[in-house]
Amino acid sequence: MLTRLVAPVAAVLSGLLLYASFPPRPLWWLVLPGFALLSGCLYGRRAWAAFGLGLLAGLGFLLPLLSWTGEEVGPVPWLALATAEALFVGVACVGIALVTRLPLWPLWGAAVWILGEAVRARVPFGGFPWGKIAFGQADSLFLPLAAVGGTPVLGFAVVLCGFGLFEAARQFRAYRSTREVPRRGAALAALTVVVPVTAALAALPLVDDSAQDGTATAAAIQGNVPRLGLDFNEQRRAVLDNHARRTEQLAADVEAGKVARPDFVLWPENSSDLDPYRNSDARAVIDRAVRAIDAPTVVGAVLTPDTGKLRNTLIEWDPERGPVATYDKRHVQPFGEYIPMRSFVRLFSSDVDRVRRDFGPGDKVGVFDLAGTKVGLATCYEAAFDWAVRDTVTGGAQLITVPSNNATFGRSEMTYQQLAMSRVRAVEHSRAVVVPVTSGVSAVIGPDGKVVRKTGMFTPDALVAEVPLRSSLTPATRLGTIPEGVLVALAGAGLGWAVFRSVRARRGTSA
Protein backbone atom coordinates (compact mmCIF):
# COMPACT_ATOMS: atom_id res chain seq x y z
CA MET A 1 0.00 0.00 0.00
CA LEU A 2 2.76 2.44 0.93
CA THR A 3 4.62 1.64 -2.28
CA ARG A 4 1.53 2.40 -4.32
CA LEU A 5 1.13 5.75 -2.60
CA VAL A 6 4.63 6.95 -3.48
CA ALA A 7 3.81 8.09 -7.02
CA PRO A 8 0.55 9.93 -6.15
CA VAL A 9 2.17 11.69 -3.21
CA ALA A 10 5.15 12.64 -5.37
CA ALA A 11 2.81 13.98 -8.06
CA VAL A 12 0.99 16.21 -5.58
CA LEU A 13 4.32 17.36 -4.16
CA SER A 14 5.56 18.26 -7.65
CA GLY A 15 2.49 20.46 -8.11
CA LEU A 16 3.05 22.11 -4.74
CA LEU A 17 6.63 22.89 -5.73
CA LEU A 18 5.39 24.55 -8.92
CA TYR A 19 2.97 26.63 -6.85
CA ALA A 20 5.66 27.59 -4.35
CA SER A 21 7.84 28.88 -7.21
CA PHE A 22 5.30 31.64 -7.97
CA PRO A 23 5.14 35.11 -6.38
CA PRO A 24 4.96 36.51 -3.84
CA ARG A 25 7.62 33.94 -2.88
CA PRO A 26 11.05 34.60 -4.46
CA LEU A 27 11.58 30.83 -4.85
CA TRP A 28 11.46 30.59 -8.65
CA TRP A 29 14.09 27.80 -8.62
CA LEU A 30 11.62 25.39 -6.95
CA VAL A 31 10.11 24.95 -10.40
CA LEU A 32 13.14 22.83 -11.39
CA PRO A 33 12.82 20.11 -8.73
CA GLY A 34 9.08 20.35 -9.30
CA PHE A 35 9.40 19.32 -12.94
CA ALA A 36 12.14 16.82 -12.13
CA LEU A 37 9.79 15.14 -9.66
CA LEU A 38 6.87 15.28 -12.10
CA SER A 39 8.86 13.65 -14.88
CA GLY A 40 9.97 10.97 -12.45
CA CYS A 41 6.29 10.21 -11.78
CA LEU A 42 5.46 10.09 -15.49
CA TYR A 43 8.48 8.31 -16.93
CA GLY A 44 7.35 5.19 -18.80
CA ARG A 45 3.79 5.32 -17.41
CA ARG A 46 0.74 4.08 -19.27
CA ALA A 47 -1.86 6.63 -20.35
CA TRP A 48 -4.41 6.30 -17.53
CA ALA A 49 -1.78 6.26 -14.82
CA ALA A 50 -0.10 9.31 -16.38
CA PHE A 51 -3.43 11.14 -16.58
CA GLY A 52 -4.21 10.43 -12.93
CA LEU A 53 -0.78 11.49 -11.74
CA GLY A 54 -0.87 14.56 -13.97
CA LEU A 55 -4.28 15.51 -12.60
CA LEU A 56 -2.94 15.23 -9.04
CA ALA A 57 0.05 17.39 -9.96
CA GLY A 58 -2.26 19.91 -11.61
CA LEU A 59 -4.46 20.09 -8.53
CA GLY A 60 -1.42 20.44 -6.26
CA PHE A 61 -0.30 23.35 -8.45
CA LEU A 62 -3.53 25.14 -9.37
CA LEU A 63 -5.71 24.72 -6.30
CA PRO A 64 -3.49 26.94 -4.14
CA LEU A 65 -2.42 29.15 -7.06
CA LEU A 66 -6.01 30.06 -7.95
CA SER A 67 -7.42 30.18 -4.42
CA TRP A 68 -8.00 33.93 -4.84
CA THR A 69 -10.82 33.17 -7.31
CA GLY A 70 -12.93 32.00 -4.38
CA GLU A 71 -12.08 34.96 -2.18
CA GLU A 72 -15.60 36.43 -2.23
CA VAL A 73 -17.74 33.83 -4.03
CA GLY A 74 -16.93 30.74 -2.00
CA PRO A 75 -15.18 27.48 -2.86
CA VAL A 76 -17.40 26.16 -5.69
CA PRO A 77 -16.18 28.46 -8.52
CA TRP A 78 -12.58 28.16 -7.29
CA LEU A 79 -12.69 24.36 -7.16
CA ALA A 80 -14.44 24.17 -10.53
CA LEU A 81 -11.88 26.40 -12.24
CA ALA A 82 -8.84 24.74 -10.66
CA THR A 83 -10.16 21.27 -11.51
CA ALA A 84 -10.94 22.24 -15.09
CA GLU A 85 -7.45 23.67 -15.55
CA ALA A 86 -5.89 20.64 -13.85
CA LEU A 87 -7.61 18.40 -16.41
CA PHE A 88 -5.57 20.15 -19.10
CA VAL A 89 -2.44 19.38 -17.11
CA GLY A 90 -3.50 15.75 -16.80
CA VAL A 91 -3.94 15.42 -20.56
CA ALA A 92 -0.57 17.08 -21.20
CA CYS A 93 1.04 14.62 -18.79
CA VAL A 94 -0.33 11.71 -20.84
CA GLY A 95 1.61 13.11 -23.78
CA ILE A 96 4.73 13.61 -21.67
CA ALA A 97 4.59 10.00 -20.45
CA LEU A 98 4.22 8.84 -24.04
CA VAL A 99 7.31 10.69 -25.30
CA THR A 100 9.49 9.50 -22.40
CA ARG A 101 10.00 6.35 -24.48
CA LEU A 102 11.76 8.36 -27.21
CA PRO A 103 15.40 9.38 -27.56
CA LEU A 104 15.89 12.99 -26.41
CA TRP A 105 12.67 12.67 -24.39
CA PRO A 106 13.18 15.83 -22.25
CA LEU A 107 13.06 17.89 -25.45
CA TRP A 108 9.79 16.32 -26.60
CA GLY A 109 8.35 16.38 -23.08
CA ALA A 110 9.02 20.08 -22.56
CA ALA A 111 7.42 20.84 -25.93
CA VAL A 112 4.33 18.84 -24.95
CA TRP A 113 4.01 20.89 -21.75
CA ILE A 114 4.05 24.10 -23.83
CA LEU A 115 1.45 22.56 -26.14
CA GLY A 116 -0.74 22.04 -23.08
CA GLU A 117 -0.25 25.66 -22.02
CA ALA A 118 -1.06 26.87 -25.54
CA VAL A 119 -4.35 24.98 -25.53
CA ARG A 120 -5.22 26.11 -22.02
CA ALA A 121 -4.60 29.74 -23.04
CA ARG A 122 -7.21 29.49 -25.81
CA VAL A 123 -10.08 27.24 -24.71
CA PRO A 124 -12.69 27.36 -23.42
CA PHE A 125 -14.17 30.88 -23.57
CA GLY A 126 -10.97 32.37 -24.95
CA GLY A 127 -8.71 30.47 -22.55
CA PHE A 128 -7.17 31.05 -19.14
CA PRO A 129 -3.35 31.41 -19.26
CA TRP A 130 -3.00 32.04 -15.51
CA GLY A 131 -0.39 29.64 -14.19
CA LYS A 132 1.84 29.65 -17.26
CA ILE A 133 5.22 28.55 -15.97
CA ALA A 134 6.83 31.65 -17.47
CA PHE A 135 4.79 33.89 -15.16
CA GLY A 136 6.58 32.48 -12.12
CA GLN A 137 10.00 33.40 -13.51
CA ALA A 138 10.12 37.17 -13.02
CA ASP A 139 13.17 36.80 -10.74
CA SER A 140 14.67 33.86 -12.59
CA LEU A 141 18.01 33.57 -14.36
CA PHE A 142 15.94 32.27 -17.31
CA LEU A 143 13.99 35.55 -17.62
CA PRO A 144 16.08 36.98 -20.55
CA LEU A 145 14.66 34.20 -22.73
CA ALA A 146 11.33 36.06 -22.66
CA ALA A 147 12.94 38.57 -25.03
CA VAL A 148 13.94 35.75 -27.38
CA GLY A 149 10.59 34.03 -27.86
CA GLY A 150 8.14 35.25 -25.26
CA THR A 151 6.48 33.16 -22.59
CA PRO A 152 6.54 29.91 -24.66
CA VAL A 153 10.33 29.92 -25.04
CA LEU A 154 10.87 30.97 -21.42
CA GLY A 155 8.55 28.24 -20.17
CA PHE A 156 10.06 25.64 -22.50
CA ALA A 157 13.57 26.31 -21.22
CA VAL A 158 12.49 26.00 -17.60
CA VAL A 159 10.59 22.74 -18.14
CA LEU A 160 13.43 21.31 -20.24
CA CYS A 161 15.92 22.05 -17.48
CA GLY A 162 13.67 20.42 -14.88
CA PHE A 163 13.26 17.29 -17.00
CA GLY A 164 17.01 17.30 -17.60
CA LEU A 165 17.63 17.19 -13.85
CA PHE A 166 15.54 14.03 -13.58
CA GLU A 167 17.40 12.49 -16.53
CA ALA A 168 20.69 13.31 -14.81
CA ALA A 169 19.47 11.57 -11.64
CA ARG A 170 18.31 8.59 -13.69
CA GLN A 171 21.68 8.26 -15.41
CA PHE A 172 23.50 8.57 -12.11
CA ARG A 173 21.39 5.76 -10.71
CA ALA A 174 22.24 3.63 -13.76
CA TYR A 175 25.92 4.36 -13.20
CA ARG A 176 25.71 3.26 -9.56
CA SER A 177 24.12 -0.01 -10.66
CA THR A 178 26.55 -0.85 -13.49
CA ARG A 179 29.63 1.26 -12.64
CA GLU A 180 29.69 2.17 -16.33
CA VAL A 181 29.15 5.69 -17.58
CA PRO A 182 26.15 5.72 -19.98
CA ARG A 183 27.68 8.21 -22.39
CA ARG A 184 24.64 9.01 -24.48
CA GLY A 185 22.40 9.33 -21.47
CA ALA A 186 24.93 11.45 -19.62
CA ALA A 187 25.35 13.71 -22.64
CA LEU A 188 21.56 14.11 -22.94
CA ALA A 189 21.23 14.96 -19.26
CA ALA A 190 24.05 17.49 -19.43
CA LEU A 191 22.75 19.16 -22.57
CA THR A 192 19.18 19.51 -21.33
CA VAL A 193 20.42 21.29 -18.21
CA VAL A 194 23.35 23.26 -19.64
CA VAL A 195 21.77 24.45 -22.91
CA PRO A 196 18.80 26.32 -21.32
CA VAL A 197 21.07 28.00 -18.78
CA THR A 198 23.61 28.92 -21.47
CA ALA A 199 20.86 30.25 -23.72
CA ALA A 200 19.54 32.43 -20.90
CA LEU A 201 23.00 33.88 -20.29
CA ALA A 202 23.47 34.46 -24.02
CA ALA A 203 20.16 36.36 -24.12
CA LEU A 204 21.25 38.84 -21.42
CA PRO A 205 22.23 41.55 -23.98
CA LEU A 206 18.58 41.66 -25.08
CA VAL A 207 17.61 42.96 -21.63
CA ASP A 208 18.15 46.69 -21.99
CA ASP A 209 16.71 49.52 -19.92
CA SER A 210 18.34 52.41 -21.79
CA ALA A 211 16.18 55.34 -22.86
CA GLN A 212 16.27 55.05 -26.66
CA ASP A 213 13.62 57.74 -27.14
CA GLY A 214 14.30 59.81 -24.07
CA THR A 215 12.26 59.62 -20.89
CA ALA A 216 8.82 60.54 -19.63
CA THR A 217 7.62 61.23 -16.12
CA ALA A 218 4.63 59.01 -15.39
CA ALA A 219 2.31 59.06 -12.41
CA ALA A 220 0.23 56.07 -11.27
CA ILE A 221 -2.68 56.79 -8.94
CA GLN A 222 -3.91 54.26 -6.38
CA GLY A 223 -6.99 55.73 -4.76
CA ASN A 224 -8.01 52.66 -2.74
CA VAL A 225 -11.57 51.43 -2.19
CA PRO A 226 -13.93 52.02 0.75
CA ARG A 227 -14.28 48.29 1.44
CA LEU A 228 -13.14 44.93 0.12
CA GLY A 229 -15.13 42.32 -1.73
CA LEU A 230 -17.59 42.07 -4.57
CA ASP A 231 -19.68 44.93 -3.17
CA PHE A 232 -16.88 47.48 -3.38
CA ASN A 233 -18.47 49.07 -6.46
CA GLU A 234 -21.74 49.76 -4.65
CA GLN A 235 -19.83 52.80 -3.39
CA ARG A 236 -18.80 53.77 -6.88
CA ARG A 237 -18.80 57.47 -6.13
CA ALA A 238 -16.50 56.90 -3.16
CA VAL A 239 -14.03 54.99 -5.37
CA LEU A 240 -14.07 57.78 -7.93
CA ASP A 241 -13.67 60.44 -5.23
CA ASN A 242 -10.71 58.55 -3.77
CA HIS A 243 -8.84 58.63 -7.08
CA ALA A 244 -9.74 62.24 -7.80
CA ARG A 245 -8.70 63.28 -4.27
CA ARG A 246 -5.35 61.49 -4.55
CA THR A 247 -4.73 63.14 -7.93
CA GLU A 248 -5.49 66.57 -6.49
CA GLN A 249 -3.13 65.84 -3.60
CA LEU A 250 -0.45 64.94 -6.15
CA ALA A 251 -1.10 68.27 -7.89
CA ALA A 252 -0.56 70.07 -4.58
CA ASP A 253 2.68 68.13 -4.03
CA VAL A 254 3.86 69.14 -7.50
CA GLU A 255 3.11 72.79 -6.80
CA ALA A 256 5.00 72.53 -3.50
CA GLY A 257 8.02 71.07 -5.31
CA LYS A 258 7.81 67.76 -3.45
CA VAL A 259 7.61 65.64 -6.60
CA ALA A 260 8.28 66.13 -10.29
CA ARG A 261 5.44 67.24 -12.54
CA PRO A 262 4.16 64.20 -14.45
CA ASP A 263 3.87 64.26 -18.23
CA PHE A 264 0.79 62.04 -17.90
CA VAL A 265 -1.24 60.33 -15.20
CA LEU A 266 -2.61 56.78 -15.13
CA TRP A 267 -5.66 55.77 -13.12
CA PRO A 268 -6.62 52.10 -12.61
CA GLU A 269 -9.34 50.02 -14.16
CA ASN A 270 -12.76 50.77 -12.58
CA SER A 271 -11.54 53.98 -11.02
CA SER A 272 -14.83 55.47 -12.25
CA ASP A 273 -17.63 52.91 -12.41
CA LEU A 274 -19.92 55.86 -12.97
CA ASP A 275 -20.18 56.52 -16.71
CA PRO A 276 -18.78 60.06 -17.12
CA TYR A 277 -20.54 60.42 -20.47
CA ARG A 278 -23.92 59.94 -18.78
CA ASN A 279 -23.26 61.20 -15.25
CA SER A 280 -22.50 64.90 -15.07
CA ASP A 281 -21.32 64.69 -11.44
CA ALA A 282 -18.73 62.01 -12.31
CA ARG A 283 -17.57 64.04 -15.31
CA ALA A 284 -17.14 67.14 -13.16
CA VAL A 285 -15.13 65.24 -10.51
CA ILE A 286 -12.77 63.77 -13.13
CA ASP A 287 -12.45 67.05 -14.99
CA ARG A 288 -11.56 68.95 -11.81
CA ALA A 289 -8.85 66.41 -10.87
CA VAL A 290 -7.34 66.34 -14.37
CA ARG A 291 -7.29 70.15 -14.58
CA ALA A 292 -5.60 70.27 -11.18
CA ILE A 293 -2.75 68.01 -12.25
CA ASP A 294 -2.73 69.64 -15.71
CA ALA A 295 -1.65 66.50 -17.56
CA PRO A 296 -3.42 64.03 -19.85
CA THR A 297 -4.90 61.30 -17.68
CA VAL A 298 -6.08 57.78 -18.46
CA VAL A 299 -9.27 57.03 -16.54
CA GLY A 300 -10.69 53.52 -16.16
CA ALA A 301 -14.47 53.69 -16.53
CA VAL A 302 -17.54 51.54 -17.07
CA LEU A 303 -19.63 52.82 -19.97
CA THR A 304 -23.35 52.06 -19.88
CA PRO A 305 -24.98 52.57 -23.30
CA ASP A 306 -28.79 52.56 -23.53
CA THR A 307 -28.70 49.28 -25.42
CA GLY A 308 -26.20 46.53 -25.90
CA LYS A 309 -23.43 45.44 -23.60
CA LEU A 310 -21.42 47.39 -21.07
CA ARG A 311 -17.89 48.48 -21.89
CA ASN A 312 -14.80 48.30 -19.67
CA THR A 313 -13.15 51.40 -21.08
CA LEU A 314 -9.99 53.43 -20.64
CA ILE A 315 -10.55 57.10 -21.46
CA GLU A 316 -7.84 59.56 -22.40
CA TRP A 317 -8.84 62.72 -20.57
CA ASP A 318 -7.25 65.99 -21.67
CA PRO A 319 -7.11 68.82 -19.11
CA GLU A 320 -8.49 71.29 -21.65
CA ARG A 321 -10.69 69.21 -23.98
CA GLY A 322 -11.96 66.50 -21.65
CA PRO A 323 -12.33 62.93 -23.01
CA VAL A 324 -10.61 62.66 -26.39
CA ALA A 325 -10.00 58.91 -26.98
CA THR A 326 -11.14 55.54 -25.65
CA TYR A 327 -9.97 51.94 -25.51
CA ASP A 328 -12.46 49.16 -24.83
CA LYS A 329 -11.04 46.07 -23.14
CA ARG A 330 -10.77 43.42 -25.87
CA HIS A 331 -10.66 40.26 -23.77
CA VAL A 332 -13.42 40.45 -21.18
CA GLN A 333 -13.31 37.94 -18.37
CA PRO A 334 -15.75 35.01 -18.50
CA PHE A 335 -17.72 34.48 -15.28
CA GLY A 336 -16.49 37.88 -14.09
CA GLU A 337 -17.42 40.45 -16.72
CA TYR A 338 -19.85 38.24 -18.58
CA ILE A 339 -21.56 34.97 -17.73
CA PRO A 340 -21.52 32.17 -20.31
CA MET A 341 -24.26 29.56 -19.89
CA ARG A 342 -25.87 31.72 -17.22
CA SER A 343 -28.82 29.44 -16.39
CA PHE A 344 -26.55 26.41 -16.00
CA VAL A 345 -23.92 28.20 -13.92
CA ARG A 346 -26.64 29.55 -11.62
CA LEU A 347 -27.25 25.98 -10.44
CA PHE A 348 -23.84 26.07 -8.74
CA SER A 349 -23.62 29.68 -7.58
CA SER A 350 -26.17 32.46 -7.27
CA ASP A 351 -23.31 34.98 -7.43
CA VAL A 352 -23.61 34.93 -11.22
CA ASP A 353 -26.60 37.26 -10.82
CA ARG A 354 -24.29 39.94 -9.44
CA VAL A 355 -23.31 40.40 -13.09
CA ARG A 356 -26.70 41.73 -14.16
CA ARG A 357 -25.53 43.00 -17.54
CA ASP A 358 -22.71 41.47 -19.52
CA PHE A 359 -19.69 43.37 -20.75
CA GLY A 360 -18.82 43.26 -24.43
CA PRO A 361 -15.32 43.24 -25.95
CA GLY A 362 -13.70 46.00 -27.93
CA ASP A 363 -12.00 45.39 -31.26
CA LYS A 364 -9.27 48.04 -31.52
CA VAL A 365 -5.69 47.95 -30.24
CA GLY A 366 -5.17 50.48 -27.47
CA VAL A 367 -2.35 53.00 -27.94
CA PHE A 368 -2.81 56.54 -26.59
CA ASP A 369 -0.60 59.50 -27.44
CA LEU A 370 -0.10 61.11 -24.05
CA ALA A 371 1.87 64.36 -24.29
CA GLY A 372 3.95 62.90 -27.12
CA THR A 373 4.47 59.46 -25.52
CA LYS A 374 2.86 56.44 -27.18
CA VAL A 375 1.39 54.39 -24.32
CA GLY A 376 0.12 50.86 -24.95
CA LEU A 377 -2.95 49.73 -23.01
CA ALA A 378 -3.66 46.24 -21.65
CA THR A 379 -6.46 46.17 -19.10
CA CYS A 380 -5.92 43.87 -16.10
CA TYR A 381 -6.78 40.30 -17.24
CA GLU A 382 -5.40 41.07 -20.72
CA ALA A 383 -1.83 41.06 -19.39
CA ALA A 384 -2.04 37.24 -19.22
CA PHE A 385 -2.55 36.98 -23.00
CA ASP A 386 0.51 37.19 -25.23
CA TRP A 387 -1.32 38.81 -28.15
CA ALA A 388 -3.03 41.50 -26.08
CA VAL A 389 0.27 43.03 -24.95
CA ARG A 390 2.26 42.43 -28.14
CA ASP A 391 -0.32 44.22 -30.28
CA THR A 392 0.27 47.46 -28.41
CA VAL A 393 4.03 47.32 -28.97
CA THR A 394 3.76 46.51 -32.68
CA GLY A 395 1.21 49.34 -32.74
CA GLY A 396 3.93 51.80 -31.72
CA ALA A 397 3.82 51.80 -27.91
CA GLN A 398 6.99 53.14 -26.24
CA LEU A 399 5.61 52.28 -22.81
CA ILE A 400 2.98 49.83 -21.56
CA THR A 401 0.40 50.34 -18.86
CA VAL A 402 -1.73 47.64 -17.23
CA PRO A 403 -4.54 49.39 -15.30
CA SER A 404 -6.08 46.83 -12.94
CA ASN A 405 -8.68 46.36 -10.23
CA ASN A 406 -7.88 43.84 -7.51
CA ALA A 407 -10.44 44.99 -4.96
CA THR A 408 -12.60 41.88 -5.36
CA PHE A 409 -9.70 39.59 -4.42
CA GLY A 410 -8.88 41.02 -1.00
CA ARG A 411 -5.37 40.51 0.31
CA SER A 412 -4.78 37.37 -1.73
CA GLU A 413 -1.75 36.56 -3.87
CA MET A 414 -3.56 37.60 -7.04
CA THR A 415 -2.04 41.08 -7.20
CA TYR A 416 1.50 39.68 -6.86
CA GLN A 417 0.89 37.06 -9.54
CA GLN A 418 -0.39 39.74 -11.90
CA LEU A 419 2.53 42.04 -11.11
CA ALA A 420 4.92 39.21 -12.04
CA MET A 421 3.16 38.90 -15.41
CA SER A 422 3.82 42.58 -16.08
CA ARG A 423 7.49 42.11 -15.16
CA VAL A 424 7.80 39.27 -17.68
CA ARG A 425 6.04 41.41 -20.32
CA ALA A 426 8.52 44.23 -19.67
CA VAL A 427 11.46 42.00 -20.60
CA GLU A 428 9.57 40.26 -23.39
CA HIS A 429 8.98 43.55 -25.23
CA SER A 430 11.75 45.70 -23.71
CA ARG A 431 9.31 48.30 -22.46
CA ALA A 432 8.76 49.97 -19.12
CA VAL A 433 5.42 48.94 -17.64
CA VAL A 434 3.30 51.06 -15.29
CA VAL A 435 0.67 49.18 -13.28
CA PRO A 436 -1.93 51.44 -11.59
CA VAL A 437 -4.22 49.38 -9.32
CA THR A 438 -7.25 50.42 -7.29
CA SER A 439 -6.14 48.74 -4.09
CA GLY A 440 -3.53 46.03 -4.71
CA VAL A 441 0.13 46.63 -5.50
CA SER A 442 0.66 49.44 -8.00
CA ALA A 443 4.13 49.54 -9.52
CA VAL A 444 6.52 51.05 -12.01
CA ILE A 445 8.61 48.40 -13.78
CA GLY A 446 11.71 49.00 -15.88
CA PRO A 447 12.29 47.40 -19.30
CA ASP A 448 14.62 44.98 -17.51
CA GLY A 449 11.73 43.63 -15.42
CA LYS A 450 12.89 45.24 -12.17
CA VAL A 451 10.36 46.99 -9.96
CA VAL A 452 11.41 50.63 -9.71
CA ARG A 453 8.67 51.75 -7.33
CA LYS A 454 5.61 50.12 -5.77
CA THR A 455 2.84 50.79 -3.29
CA GLY A 456 1.47 48.81 -0.39
CA MET A 457 -1.91 47.11 -0.53
CA PHE A 458 -5.09 49.05 0.28
CA THR A 459 -3.36 52.36 0.78
CA PRO A 460 -3.97 55.57 -1.22
CA ASP A 461 -0.76 56.51 -2.99
CA ALA A 462 0.74 58.12 -6.07
CA LEU A 463 3.84 56.80 -7.78
CA VAL A 464 5.82 59.31 -9.82
CA ALA A 465 8.82 58.04 -11.77
CA GLU A 466 10.89 58.93 -14.78
CA VAL A 467 10.66 55.98 -17.15
CA PRO A 468 12.71 55.19 -20.26
CA LEU A 469 10.94 55.20 -23.61
CA ARG A 470 11.92 52.61 -26.19
CA SER A 471 10.96 51.82 -29.78
CA SER A 472 13.20 48.88 -30.78
CA LEU A 473 11.55 45.47 -31.07
CA THR A 474 12.86 42.34 -29.37
CA PRO A 475 13.00 39.05 -31.29
CA ALA A 476 9.98 37.96 -29.23
CA THR A 477 7.97 40.96 -30.39
CA ARG A 478 9.00 40.51 -34.02
CA LEU A 479 8.36 36.77 -34.10
CA GLY A 480 4.98 36.86 -32.35
CA THR A 481 3.38 33.42 -32.29
CA ILE A 482 6.10 31.74 -34.39
CA PRO A 483 8.15 30.38 -31.42
CA GLU A 484 5.02 28.92 -29.86
CA GLY A 485 4.04 27.43 -33.22
CA VAL A 486 7.46 25.80 -33.58
CA LEU A 487 7.24 24.28 -30.09
CA VAL A 488 3.70 23.04 -30.74
CA ALA A 489 4.89 21.47 -34.00
CA LEU A 490 7.80 19.89 -32.11
CA ALA A 491 5.35 18.45 -29.59
CA GLY A 492 3.19 17.12 -32.41
CA ALA A 493 6.17 15.49 -34.07
CA GLY A 494 7.23 13.86 -30.80
CA LEU A 495 3.75 12.58 -30.07
CA GLY A 496 3.37 11.28 -33.60
CA TRP A 497 6.69 9.47 -33.43
CA ALA A 498 5.83 7.96 -30.05
CA VAL A 499 2.46 6.71 -31.30
CA PHE A 500 4.07 5.24 -34.42
CA ARG A 501 6.66 3.39 -32.35
CA SER A 502 4.00 2.11 -29.98
CA VAL A 503 1.79 0.81 -32.82
CA ARG A 504 4.74 -0.81 -34.55
CA ALA A 505 5.82 -2.49 -31.30
CA ARG A 506 2.33 -3.89 -30.77
CA ARG A 507 2.20 -5.27 -34.28
CA GLY A 508 5.59 -6.85 -33.85
CA THR A 509 4.48 -8.44 -30.60
CA SER A 510 1.26 -9.81 -32.09
CA ALA A 511 3.18 -11.18 -35.10
Image (spheres, rainbow, N blue to C red):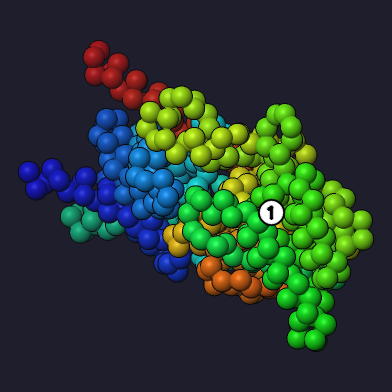
Q: How many marks?
A: 1
Relative to residue 37, is residue 356 drawn left or right? right
Location of residue 194 in the rendering, given as x and y in whole percent from the top left corner: 47, 61
Q: Left of 139 or right of it: where is 443? A: right
Residue 9 appears in the figure: yes
From the image, tell me which residue sits under label 1: 272
Pinpoint residue 337: horizontal percent, then vertical percent: 58, 39
Q: Residue at x 74, y 32 (%)?
A: 306
Q: Tell me the crowding category of disc 1: few under 14, some 14 to 19, or many 20 or more residues within 10 angstroms, Cα based.
A: many
> Going by the image, does 10 lie left or right of 111?
left
- Foreground of the two, 353 or 69: 353
Give how far across and how far down residue 398 sits, in percent: 80, 59
Question: In this rendering, is residue 253 above or below 484?
Answer: below
Q: Residue at x 64, y 36 (%)?
A: 359
Point out the residue furthest to the front here: 281
- Residue farthest along the right direction in this orientation: 320
Q: Secondary structure at mark 1?
A: loop
Among all residues in the image, which is located at the extreme top?
511
Is 348 rendered above or below residue 265?
Answer: above
Q: Quadrant location of the N terminus?
A: top left
x and y percent of residue 452 in the render? 64, 74
State the residue at coordinates (85%, 52%): 323
* Apparent side of residue 371 relative to residue 110 in the rendered image (left or right): right
Residue plotted at (57% across, 51% down): 234
- Residue 66 visible in rendering: no
452 or 310, which is in the foreground?
Answer: 310
Where on the picture, by quarter, is residue 447? bottom right
Q: Quadrant of the C terminus?
A: top left
Give the residue type at disc 1: Ser
Given residues 19 and 353, the one toward you in this image is 353
